[in-house]
Image (cartoon, rainbow, N blue to C red):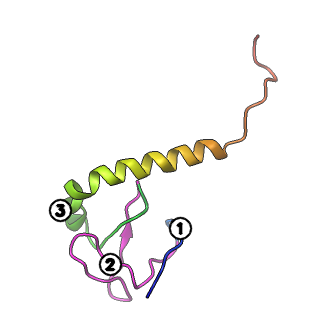
Amino acid sequence: SCHITGPMSENEKVPPCEACASCGIRGGDNVKLKRCTACKLVHYCSVACQKENRPQHKRACKRRAAELRDELLFRQPESTLMGDCL
């Protein structure tokens, strides 16, 4: 069994154990799955499958995308006060 511990970068290959969230086809040499760019949690084999699955995926996707944005904001270094008008 395959277990992904966290989001992968867009350049990393999708493990063959992942499957299309819409049709269920497994990724591998002949099938290249693409990760949802907003939430990075699900994979799709085609744009058609992504569009078909959108109503089911939309709510969870928006919630996870917001979490990812928050994580990114909290990792940003605090700006210095140099140059700021007081």
Q: Which residue is mark 2?
A: 19
Task: Please name which of the two marks, 1 or 3, marks the residue nearer to the observer.
Answer: 1
Per the image, label 3 sits on a secondary structure element best described as helix
Q: Residues within 10 Å of mark 2 (few under 14, many from 20)?
A: many
**Residue 24 colored in magenta in the image:** yes
Q: Residue furthest top?
A: 86
Residue flagged by tag 3: what amino acid is it?
Answer: Glu
Q: Nearer the viewer, residue 2 or 51?
A: 2
Magenta segment, which residues?
12-38
Q: Position of residue 62 (x, y in %)?
A: 36, 48
Q: Residues within 10 Å of mark 1 (few under 14, many from 20)?
A: few
State the separation of the CA atoms marked 1 and 3: 25 Å
Q: Which residue is mark 1?
A: 6
Q: Position of residue 40 (x, y in %)?
A: 43, 61
State the separation of the CA atoms marked 2 and 1: 16 Å
Q: Position of residue 77 (x, y in %)?
A: 72, 41
Q: Nearer the viewer, residue 51 or 21?
A: 21
State the separation of the CA atoms marked 2 and 3: 15 Å
Question: Residue 62: which disc?
Answer: none
Q: Nearer the viewer, residue 39 or 45?
A: 39
- Residue visible at 40% across and 54% down? 38
